[in-house]
Amino acid sequence: MTTLETLQGDITTLDVDAIVNAANTSLMGGGGVDGAIHRAAGPDLVRECMGLGGCKTGQAKMTKGYQLKARHVIHTVGPVWHGGDANEPVLLRSCYENSLKLAAEAGLQSMAFPCISTGVYRFPADEAARIAIATVREFTANPSSLQRVIFCCFSTEDQERYERLLQP
Ligand code: AR6
């Protein structure tokens, strides 16, 4: 059984096996949660990222966590919202699925997601949360190493949204 939880706060402070980064295709850092993760992890993170050759939208790549409490960072690239007809929902779903796959393949027990694509990439928060929850629920319906999946929300508004949507 995997438990799905919500938290309000800064994902860089979490003591989990992996935190997920809402990165861009360069994997070289940026603003928002990406900037916060790189600042907290220290310069070794970008050094490892340099060797990864970037990441396509919807895909995911894993690195070490360096100075973070989290042992690993799973970098995924969410879609930029262009109105909803450019495959955005499918790509966002892939971000969650591929991140979960990487974590399970590595035998990780706990991981935390930020609200991927809902910041500067402008994906509507409600639809993004529905996709996030549905994808995590479907993946964790099958047995895996994952015992805890946390939706780490930066705003109380997002946390309330996830709590509402997680009600049975
Ligand atoms: N902990 C948890 N969530 C956070 C944190 C934090 N420390 N900081 C921000 N958020 P965004 P995107 C939330 O813009 O839309 C970067 O420049 C934020 O409130 O970080 O996927 C990348 O390099 C929002 O709910 O990511 C890309 O170029 C969520 O994280 C681009 O932004 C995502 O917001 C990716 O855009």
Image (cartoon, rainbow, N blue to C red):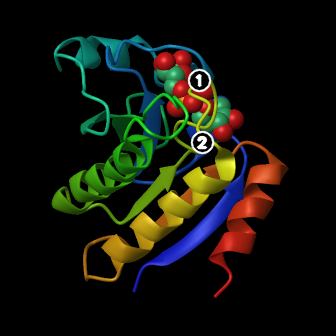
Disc 2: CA contacts within 10 A as few (<14), some (14-19) or many (>=20): many
> Which residue: 49% across, 41% down?
69
* Disc marking residue 11: 2
Disc 1: CA contacts within 10 A as few (<14), some (14-19) or many (>=20): some
Q: Position of residue 105 (x, y in %)?
A: 16, 59
Work out which quarter of the rendered image holds the N terminus and state it.
bottom left
Which quadrant of the structure image shows residue 139?
Answer: bottom left
Quadrant containing ligand 1: top right
Let me know if residue 110 appears in the view.
Answer: yes
In the image shown, does 125 or 14 lie closer to the viewer? 125
Mark 1, ligand 1, within 8 Å: the answer is: yes
* Vertical position of residue 87 compared to residue 42: above or below: below
Q: Position of residue 4 (x, y in %)?
A: 54, 73
Mark 1 sits on what residue? 36
Mark 2, ligand 1, within 8 Å: the answer is: yes
Q: Position of residue 24 (x, y in %)?
A: 40, 21
* Vertical position of residue 2 compared to residue 15: above or below: below
Q: Position of residue 167 (x, y in %)?
A: 68, 82
Which quadrant of the structure image shows residue 161?
Answer: bottom right
> Which residue: 37% across, 41% down?
87
In the image shown, does 104 or 45 lie closer to the viewer? 104
Hey, what amino acid is under mark 2?
Ile
